[in-house]
Image (cartoon, grey):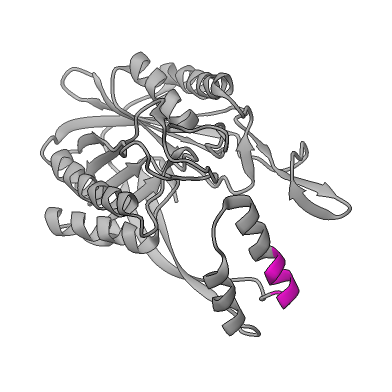
Amino acid sequence: MSRFGMHREVINPPLGTAFIGYHREVGIASIHDPLYVTASIFESEQTTSVFVSIDNIGMLVADTDVIREGIAGQLDVSKEQITVVYTHTHSGPATAGNEPLTVAYKTILTQQAIVSAVNASEAMQTVEMGWGVTSGKLGVNRREKINGHAVMGTNPLGVTDDRIGTLLVRRVDDACLVGAFVFCTAHPNVLKSDSVVLSGDYPGVARTLLEQALGCPVVIVQGAAGNINAKYRGDIESLQKMAFTLSGHVLTTIPAVSFQPLTHHRIQSCIHPMRLTEIPAMNVLRDMADYAEQTWGVSAARWLAYIQERSGATLTIPLEVQLFELNEGSFS
């Protein structure tokens, strides 16, 4: 038997909270579309896995671990069975820093994520699920090559990942959809530094469109978007174009989806020591610090001092990699 539960909470911060994603001189002035934390639980004969999606650019590993460990304690599952992803909106609130609003918001958000998982566990129902995959141009490669060097721009020949995956979950007894997960790849950076509205960016707007069409909660999962800018950028009209593009591609896959019980279910976690590039010369480090301060309005002094102390060393980061499999579909 396969079971599934889902619950979400609104996580809009107070107006005035600082943004993260682009540097703005002012905090959040108004709300364009709401932000959510959505917890989902997949249960099969093999295992139980918890999947939490948060509308934020991302949180520190330590803060994410607080969420995972809190859920693990409440639901009696291991931390390795819990995956937390971020939609990566560039128009959401900061969660790192010592400002009172930021600290308070992060505290509330953390608790809401844990509560959402508990509520999802209390809403379990018998389900079947199916995958659909299509292709659609959502992003452009932003590593433009000039005189042999990569700069921020547009590279029409650069690599993009145009796959769009959809996982649909429906009740067995009446075949009604109870959840949908969309996997795509492009930075949610449509709204830029001149925007002061809170927004889930194109994943948030696309989610609303899809929920109206499908009649169930929708989660947008961001792929490896490091070099991929949104195809349309800069204003609310571009936000709508991105959302319509994504939701349109998803809806074309729905008729071909075939459903079956959850028969193959696995989540695997390992720690990989990711080796970093060699530390550059001091003049290059200072240029990087100056660029960060001028571009994003943040102080890079602590970073610069930390790197200076480790000059000549090879640095690694212990990076957790999670693999999540449901029947014939997977992501990591």
- What residue is rendered at 20% in x and 49% in y? 111
Q: Residue at x 48, y 33 (%)?
A: 196
**Residue 209 as seen in the image, left or right of residue 192:** left
The extreme left residue here reads: 122
Image coordinates for residue 121, horizontal then vertical, percent: 14, 42
Q: Position of residue 243 (x, y in %)?
A: 50, 23
Nearer the observer, 198 or 173: 198
Q: Is residue 206 visible?
A: yes
Q: Where 283 sits versus 102, above or below?
A: below
Is residue 147 one of those drawn in magenta? no
Name the image quarter holding the N terminus: top left
Examine the structure image and report whether residue 285 is included in the region drawn in magenta. Answer: yes
Percent across and percent down for residue 189 are: 55, 37
Give the magenta range.
280-287
Task: Give residue 304's quadrant in the image.
Answer: bottom right
Whether residue 275 can be seen here: no
Front residue of 185 and 49: 185
Indicate the position of residue 210 as horizontal and vertical percent values: 39, 20
Tell me what residue is drawn at x 24 percent, y 35 percent: 8
Prevailing secondary structure of the magenta residues = helix
Which residue is found at the position 82% from the left and 55% from the top? Answer: 149
Front in this rendered view, residue 264 or 299: 299
Q: Quadrant of residue 76?
A: bottom left
Residue projecting furthest to the right: 147
- Please count the marks in the image: 0
Left or right: residue 245 versus residue 129 is right
Horizontal side of 272 relative to 17 (left or right) equals right
- Left/right placement of residue 266 relative to residue 58 reads left
